[in-house]
Image (cartoon, rainbow, N blue to C red):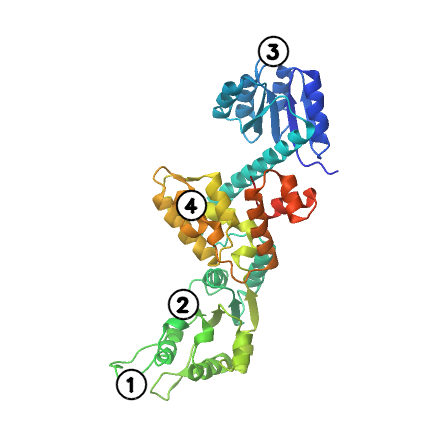
């Protein structure tokens, strides 16, 4: 079995020490056991431990002193106090001093192993949070796109590779997935970065004005045209134009856009002078343009011109490894100079939610929560109703992976232990453990 972590056990009772060592090694952990607490304290300086089990009542130094040494010399080690019945008050004091939890004697092997899985999950989460916070703290540029998702990283690498070319890029993705950020990323990594990036939301422009907005007009060409006006393409000369929601551009403007992509030329509305500009075109859509082709609302020749390079952004529900990273990024963004924490209960709800509005929805919710968290800790009460009551979430059309994650999270909320959850889900407990790790469903 592959080692899953390194554990320090300190207990001056040989039988207890032996039992813990056998039980933890059986679930793949590497265990160092010490009867003498002073020897354990010396070992802390030599080795790095993920978890430490510390007996409370020992000689010549007690568990509280060992805990203090661990907190000083190895602050990333997750400490657990072992206590006998009747010493609960002391165990609570140990938790206040930095221990994660306590394990009460007597215990059997199965209880020990399940308890340790919970501690290990917590340790991995805390280690991940520490790493993510460091990553977020190092990021200075607003155009950096945060992700640890393989698919997203591949798409960003493609964007980086084509940034310096004149190839037209089509970015596809659901609303809120970051299409505008990717357009900014391409522009910032191109040799046009010192020139303008002009952003146009095609869906927000009236059909009778979109051609004028894009290509300009001359005085008197239509009612309200009181003077000559440059279009967005002229303003973007030597730079980049980003045409968001390109599927909403009307057929008449599609023809003119196609001509520009073919010949790099156009006329303003109301004049016959042909103009040329040097503009790189990036387009985006929140629906598949291939479907618009079938419906007859989008020109096939324009589609193939736009689709020289296609970048497809996965929805946030398929980027579960990015959720915590983005949470801490947005907390930092909206907390100003004061640091804001987040409670485990609130974090669990945020990581279990299917995020139909993607990254934009997550950012809005964190901005709201930071504003409401007067005590600088985001609690469940600071989250909107659809997150506080997951049963009311309308999941819509989700991937099988997203549905599996959501269902497992629901089962884990109502069962008494992992064995019962595995029986209900009809999977092996080891499989359940791996899926909980994959989806970030920590206790």
Q: Earlier in the sequence, mark 4 or mark 1?
A: 1
Q: Secondary structure at mark 1?
A: loop
90 relative to 122, above or below: above
Name the mark on residue 59.
3
Name the residue rendered at 49%, 19% in the picture.
Answer: 89
In this rendering, which labeled residue sits more in front, label 4 or label 1?
4
Q: Is residue 45 visible?
A: no
Q: Earlier in the sequence, mark 4 or mark 3?
A: 3
Name the mark on residue 331.
4
Measure the C-alpha gap from mark 2 to mark 3: 70 Å
Q: Quadrant of residue 111?
A: top right
Name the mark on residue 222.
1
In this rendering, which labeled residue sits more in front, label 2 or label 3?
3
Q: Earlier in the sequence, mark 1 or mark 2?
A: 2
How busy is the neighbourhood of tag 4: few (under 14 within 10 Å), some, or many (20 plus)?
many
Measure the C-alpha gap from mark 4 to mark 1: 49 Å
How busy is the neighbourhood of tag 1: few (under 14 within 10 Å), some, or many (20 plus)?
few
Residue identifier under label 2 = 199
How busy is the neighbourhood of tag 3: few (under 14 within 10 Å), some, or many (20 plus)?
few
Q: Secondary structure at mark 2?
A: strand
In this rendering, which labeled residue sits more in front, label 1 or label 3?
3
Q: Residue furthest bottom?
A: 272
């Amino acid at each position: 079995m592959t080692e899953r972590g390194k554990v320090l056990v300190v207990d001056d009772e040989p039988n207890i020490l032996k039992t813990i060592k056998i039980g933890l090694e059986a679930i793949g952990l590497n265990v160092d056991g010490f009867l003498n607490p002073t020897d354990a304290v010396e070992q802390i300086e030599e080795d790095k431990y993920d978890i430490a089990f510390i007996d409370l009542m020992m000689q010549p130094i007690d568990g509280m002193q060992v805990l203090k040494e661990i907190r000083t010399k190895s602050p990333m080690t997750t400490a657990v106090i072992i206590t006998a019945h009747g010493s609960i008050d002391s165990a609570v004091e140990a938790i206040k001093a930095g221990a994660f939890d306590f394990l009460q004697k007597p215990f059997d092997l199965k209880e020990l192993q399940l308890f340790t899985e919970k501690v290990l999950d917590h340790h991995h989460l805390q280690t991940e949070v520490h790493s993510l916070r460091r990553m977020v703290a190092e990021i200075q540029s607003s155009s950096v796109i945060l992700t640890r998702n393989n698919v997203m990283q591949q798409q960003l690498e493609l964007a980086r590779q084509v940034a310096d070319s004149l190839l037209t890029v089509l970015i596809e993705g659901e609303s809120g997935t970051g299409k505008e950020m990717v357009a900014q990323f391409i522009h910032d990594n191109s040799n046009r970065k010192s020139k303008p990036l002009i952003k146009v939301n095609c869906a927000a422009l009236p059909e009778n004005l979109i051609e004028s907005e894009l290509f300009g007009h001359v005085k008197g060409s239509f009612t309200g045209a009181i003077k000559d006006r440059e279009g967005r393409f002229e303003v973007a000369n030597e730079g980049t134009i980003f045409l968001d929601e390109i599927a909403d551009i009307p057929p008449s403007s599609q023809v003119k856009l196609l001509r520009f992509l073919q010949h790099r030329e156009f006329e303003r509305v109301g004049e016959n002078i042909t103009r040329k500009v040097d503009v790189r075109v990036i387009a985006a859509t929140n629906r598949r343009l291939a479907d618009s082709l079938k419906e007859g609302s989008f020109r096939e020749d324009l589609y193939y011109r736009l689709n020289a390079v296609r970048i497809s952004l996965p929805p946030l529900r398929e980027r579960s490894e990015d959720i915590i990273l983005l949470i801490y990024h947005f907390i930092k963004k909206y907390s100003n100079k004061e640091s804001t924490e987040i409670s485990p209960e609130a974090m669990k709800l945020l990581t279990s939610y299917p995020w139909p509005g993607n990254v934009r929805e997550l950012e809005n919710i964190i901005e709201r929560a930071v504003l409401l968290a007067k005590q600088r800790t985001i609690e469940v009460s600071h989250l909107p109703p659809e997150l506080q009551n997951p049963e009311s979430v309308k999941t819509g059309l989700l991937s099988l992976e997203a549905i599996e994650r959501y269902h497992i999270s629901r089962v884990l909320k109502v069962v008494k232990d992992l064995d019962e959850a595995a029986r209900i889900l009809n999977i092996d407990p080891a499989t359940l453990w791996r899926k909980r790790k994959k989806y970030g469903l920590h206790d």
